[in-house]
Image (cartoon, rainbow, N blue to C red):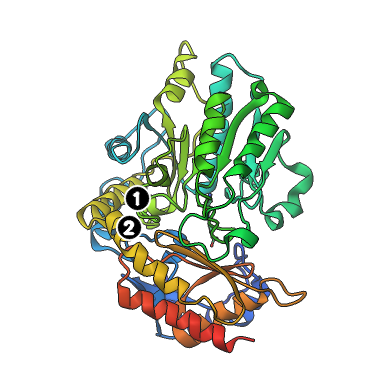
């Protein structure tokens, strides 16, 4: 194309002359990245193509989100057709059929009376929306003193002010520490390497850590507490599987004191642990769930809050007329996201991908635990198709060792993994084949042996 015209598609970008300076990259060491960039240009199924043409096996489903594999034809087609038919429709005081249809189809996957859906565009927005729904609910119910929010140490709930306030990842909070939400408490995290290292599936020890919630209730009074938010399986912090009995106890204490329980299922939702949602896997019904990522197979940004019918009814019926909940986004229920979501649900259903994740889980478990004994490995934990491999840190350089494994896996082994601190996280698309699991584990094992 003529050089006077700006490129408008990936194929037309001149990679050799691509300027990296202008973009401020998220959660990235910008200066180091721009010195030695890692660029992806295409994707199909289990593989990315890197800018230098190498095929890269995706061991992380992008960022835990491309559960059905990349560039699935039915999803790409649905997006393209919808973009041509109706690109956008206002979501305030107006609607379009796709958003109602997607909400209806999703609720078929949900347990009990979790059957109301509020759409957002990301997990962070879903979390902030859920926290606001909790406050609106208690106000509508005539208990406006219930405002306290309880999260958990090492929890990740996105990057909104609400999410980092209830979240418990220190590095995400410290630049903003003076302006976080007030009236927030944190439960202890559930990681206990002394008792639970190398557990397969749910660790045996730690159910009693839930009792800290009872302590917080005693300290503050139940009538001051609006909601508890936790990831059923903590992802971002490095894959922490809930101890046996822990989630049951959290649920029981919340029920006893009438505290709303929010499961943040942004990672666990849509099949990651071998069930539609962690709520089903653990057979525990939260009062709300937050999701994103797998809802559209990450093809178009979308998040959602799933809400028990009674919460919706309470908020909506509390207002005589007019708008009941002063909250929403320009792109809530965006037509492209809804089209992608419907097609994604179709792929999950037609290919039985949640069941596939469940049936591959034992093979995946054996594969990741075969790395026990590899150099510097101090713990391995897993559930469904997610695993964390924790390495001993280099003195004074937390995260450096795992990051070197990550860069070498990408550069030398053509395998994409993810690291957080010194923990390697694996979460392949649910379409992964056994030989690809072997390839991912083989690459990690080889690099663990080589990296100092
Ligand atoms: N809650 C949970 C449990 C998450 O895992 C969010 C909320 C926020 O979602 P958005 O869509 O706003 O990013 C997340 C996101 C990683 C990693 O590798 C994890 C996430 C995002 C990016 C990277 O640990 N989780």
Residue 216 in the image: above or below residue 125 = above
Secondary structure type for disc 2:
helix
How many numbered discs, if any?
2
- Indicate which disc, 1 or 2, sits on the residue closer to the N terminus: 1
Task: Give the label on residue 275, or none.
Answer: 1
Image coords of residue 22 (percent x, y): 62, 69
Q: Position of residue 303 (x, y in %)?
A: 44, 45
Q: Say if 337 sits above or below 326 in the image.
A: below
Asked if 183 appears above or below 325 in the picture, the reply is below
Q: Please give the label number shown on residue 418.
A: none
Check contact, mark 1 vs mark 2: CB within 8 A.
yes
Rendered view: 189 above or below 367: above
* Numbered mark located on residue 358 in the image: 2
Left or right placement of residue 26 versus residue 94 in this view: right
Mark 2: C-beta under 8 Å from nearest atom of ligand 1: no
Q: Which residue is drawn at 54% across and 16% down?
A: 141
Q: Residue at x 40, y 85 (%)?
A: 53
Q: Which residue is drawn at 63% across and 50% down?
A: 189
């Amino acid at each position: 194309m003529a050089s006077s015209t700006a490129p408008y598609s990936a194929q037309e970008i001149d990679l050799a002359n691509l300027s990296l300076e202008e973009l401020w990259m998220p959660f990235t060491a910008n200066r180091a990245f721009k010195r030695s960039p890692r660029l992806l240009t295409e994707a199909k199924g289990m593989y990315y193509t890197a800018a230098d043409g190498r095929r890269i096996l995706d061991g992380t489903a992008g960022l835990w989100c491309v559960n059905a594999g990349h560039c699935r034809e039915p999803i790409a087609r649905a997006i393209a057709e919808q973009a041509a038919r109706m690109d956008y429709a206002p979501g305030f005081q107006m609607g379009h059929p796709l958003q109602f249809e997607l909400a209806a189809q999703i609720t078929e996957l949900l347990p009990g009376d979790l059957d109301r859906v509020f759409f957002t565009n990301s997990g962070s927005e879903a979390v902030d929306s859920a926290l606001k729904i909790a406050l609106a609910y208690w106000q509508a119910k005539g208990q406006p003193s219930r405002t306290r929010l309880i999260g958990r140490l090492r929890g990740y709930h996105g990057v909104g002010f609400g999410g980092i306030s209830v979240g418990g990842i220190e590095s995400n909070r410290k630049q903003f520490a003076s302006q976080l939400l007030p009236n927030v408490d944190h439960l202890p995290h559930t990681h206990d390497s002394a008792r639970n290292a190398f557990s397969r599936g749910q660790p045996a020890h730690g159910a009693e850590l839930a009792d800290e919630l009872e302590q917080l209730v005693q300290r503050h009074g139940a009538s001051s507490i609006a909601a508890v938010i936790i990831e059923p399986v903590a992802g971002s912090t490095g894959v922490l599987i809930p101890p046996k009995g822990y989630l049951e106890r959290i649920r029981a204490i919340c029920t006893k004191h009438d505290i709303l329980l929010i499961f943040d299922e942004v990672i666990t939702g849509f099949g990651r642990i071998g069930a539609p949602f962690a709520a089903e896997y653990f057979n525990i019904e939260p009062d709300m769930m937050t999701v994103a990522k797998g809802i559209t197979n990450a093809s178009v940004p979308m998040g959602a809050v799933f809400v028990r019918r009674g919460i919706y009814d309470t908020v909506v019926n509390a207002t005589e007329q007019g708008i009941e909940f002063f909250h929403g986004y320009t792109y809530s229920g965006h037509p492209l996201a809804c089209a992608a979501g419907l097609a994604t649900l179709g792929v999950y259903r037609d290919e039985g991908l949640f069941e596939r994740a469940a049936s591959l889980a034992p093979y995946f478990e054996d594969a990741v635990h075969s790395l026990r004994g590899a150099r510097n490995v101090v713990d391995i934990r897993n559930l469904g198709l997610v695993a964390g491999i924790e390495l001993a840190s280099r003195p004074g350089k937390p995260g450096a060792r795992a990051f070197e494994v990550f860069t070498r896996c990408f550069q030398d082994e053509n395998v994409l993994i993810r690291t957080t601190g010194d923990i390697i996280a694996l979460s392949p698309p649910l379409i992964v084949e056994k030989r690809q699991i072997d390839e991912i584990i083989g690459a990690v094992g080889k690099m663990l042996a080589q990296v100092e």
